[in-house]
Structures are given as structure tokens and as C-alpha cells.
Image: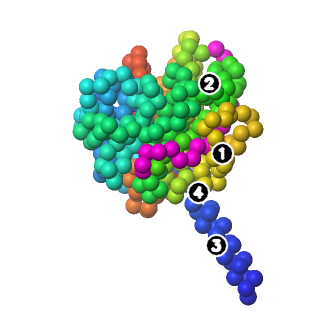
Amino acid sequence: MRRLFLILTLLLMIAQMMSAQSELLGVNRQRHFSGILPGNYSGIAHIRGDEYAVVSDKSFSNGFFVFKIAVDSITGDILSVRDNGFHGNDMKGGDLEGIAYNPVTNTVFISGEADNSVAEYTLQGDTTGRRMSVPDVFRHATGNAGLESLSYNVHTGMYWTMNESTLTCDGLQTTSVNRLRNRLRLQSFGEDLLPRNQYAYLMDEPVADKTARNYAMGVSEVLALDNGRLLVLERELYVPKQKIGAFVNCKIYEVNPSEAQPISTSEPLTASSPYMDKRLIYSWRTNITLLDHSFANYEGMCLGPFLKDGSRVVILISDSQNGYGGILKDWFKTIVIK
């Protein structure tokens, strides 16, 4: 009898572990809305109700927009998007990339690639003076390869960010011709804004194998889930000289920090570093062809509302480079997970 009890307990534990993993329940097509102006939207965070804070990496001053996003309560599809104005200050040039809202402090935190800092803002757009103690290793970021992402989850009380591409101390970055895999560092912070654990993350091998006019391969966003796991958005953008044939490959992976081995911030990443296990949730591709102008560089991702069946919406937003060439659009997309 005791043995049977132990077996049943073990099976229950396994079932609970399996149920903790995210499951993709639905995918909605990307949509463009006239309620917002063309921009360089690089991050999104849910505030409350249908209000979302959206950051732009080329905004005229540091701060964020507030978008009202209506979502279908059954399908999770986006019904409308409206810009409710910009909340910012007189500071400029922060190259703002990631944004996270903390309902406990009723403030947002924004990461900037210009100096790889993470600063706190009021909902009016003023800085509070508080900043996260970002480990010195992230000073090895070059150009647009720094802290692209940012997420917070109130259930775990943890903030998360990751560098977009390989730091100079960790090796060479992926290009459209070298076939290298980016070695990245996933960093957590506590409510006190002090660093916690850091983990090694290895991106997939690139698809591109030709010289590009524009190329970007990196993690553009992380999303902290209620169960302590994270979704990681890998993005490969390739634009050839003639532009026709351009594509963006996006992949959403799930990782579990509790099952990963923390790394040292002072030792370089190598081929033998303890990289996190990752599980593919969803992948898709957008293009520029003669008949297909779906090209979308997704850079922002956040949790949206719960649906009537208890599942959860994940909202994604793309960077159109201000509607570049009159071709690119500010696309929105949702997936549904459980």
C-alpha cells in the first residue's frame, strides 16, 4: 500500500511539473491599426485594464506611450489599438528598448541600450532616481546589442532582462554569413533592484547565409510568467541589397531558471558553458516579396488579459522603423497560452 502511495505521489508530481509548462492554444494573425502613428515601438507592458505602456527606441524624449488595446475575450484577437498620449520628460537619447510595470510600486522600469541602464519612471513619465544595479559585464555590449528586453512578474517578484547579442567578452556576434550562435546572459533582479542570478542562453543557428544590407540576430524580448518560467523571443532579421526577399524569423522559447545552473558574471561564456534548456512554443516568418508585405520586426512582448476559458493572451508589437519606405507597418499579433 505504501509503495502504491509513493508511486501515485510521484505520478502526481510529474503531472504537476508537466502542467507548469506553457501550452500554445491558439495563434491570431498580425494586424495593423490606424489608431496609432508609425513609430519605432520596441517594448510593451500591461498596466491595468486595457491600458499598456509602450516604449519607442527613437522617441523624441525619454518616456513611454499609453496605448488602449481591446482584445476579444474568446479568441484573444486584437480588436482595436488607440494611442492615448506620450508620458515623458526632457531627457533624450536613451535608446529605450524594454519596459516593465510593477503594480506594487505603480511605476514602470525602462531599459536603455545607450548606456545599458534600467531606470524607474512614474506613470506621468518622470524618473524617480531609482535604477537597477546592472552587473558590469553588460558594459561589454556594443552598439545595439545591449539590454533590449525587460519584464517583471508580480507573482515571483522578479525582474528579468537579457542582452540582445553576444557581449565582446563572450565572443563574436552572429552575422548573416558567419553561422555563429549568439551567447547571451539572462539576468534577474529582486524588488530591491539588486542583481540575483545570471544564466547562459544560447540562440539558434541563423538561417541567413548571404551578405545583407541590414541584419539583426538577437533576443528582442523576454516575458516573465506567473509560474516562474520565461518566454524568450529570438528574432533574425535579414534584408538583402535589393530588399525583395527580406524576412524576419521569430521563435518563442520557454525556459525555466529553477532548472538551470547560474553562471559567474566575471567568467566569459564558452562552448562548454551551462546553457539553459529551452523548449519551442511557436515560430513564424514574415517577408517582403512582390506579393507579400507582411515583414514585421517583433521587438515587444507582454502578458495580456485572461480569456473566458482561463487561457492567457500574449501580445506582441513590432518596430516599423517609422513606417520605413511607406511599406513597413506597426504590426500587432497575439498568441494564446495556458
Which of disc 3 and disc 4 is earlier in sequence?
3
Q: Secondary structure at mark 4?
A: loop
Q: Which residue is mark 3?
A: 12
Which of disc 3 and disc 1 is earlier in sequence?
3
Between circles 1 and 3, the one closer to the viewer is 1
| Residue contact between numbered discs 3 and 2, judged by CB atoms under 8 Å | no
Residue 273 at x, y = what percent?
Answer: 71, 39
The magenta span reads 191-211
Q: Residue type at mark 3?
A: Leu
Instruction: Give how far apart the Cα atoms at labels 2 and 4 are.
Output: 34 Å
Determine the main secondary structure of the stretch shown in magenta.
Answer: loop
Choose top left, top right, bottom left or bottom right for residue 37: top left
Q: Secondary structure at mark 1?
A: loop
Q: Do we see residue 209 in this rendering? A: no
Q: Which residue is mark 2?
A: 168
Q: Is residue 172 left or right of residue 285?
A: right
Q: Which residue is mark 4?
A: 21
Q: Do we see residue 200 in this rendering? A: yes
Instruction: Give how far apart the Cα atoms at labels 2 and 1 are.
Output: 20 Å
Q: Residue type at mark 2?
A: Thr
Q: Residues within 10 Å of mark 3 (few under 14, many from 20)?
A: few
Q: Residue type at mark 4?
A: Gln
Which of disc 2 and disc 3 is earlier in sequence?
3
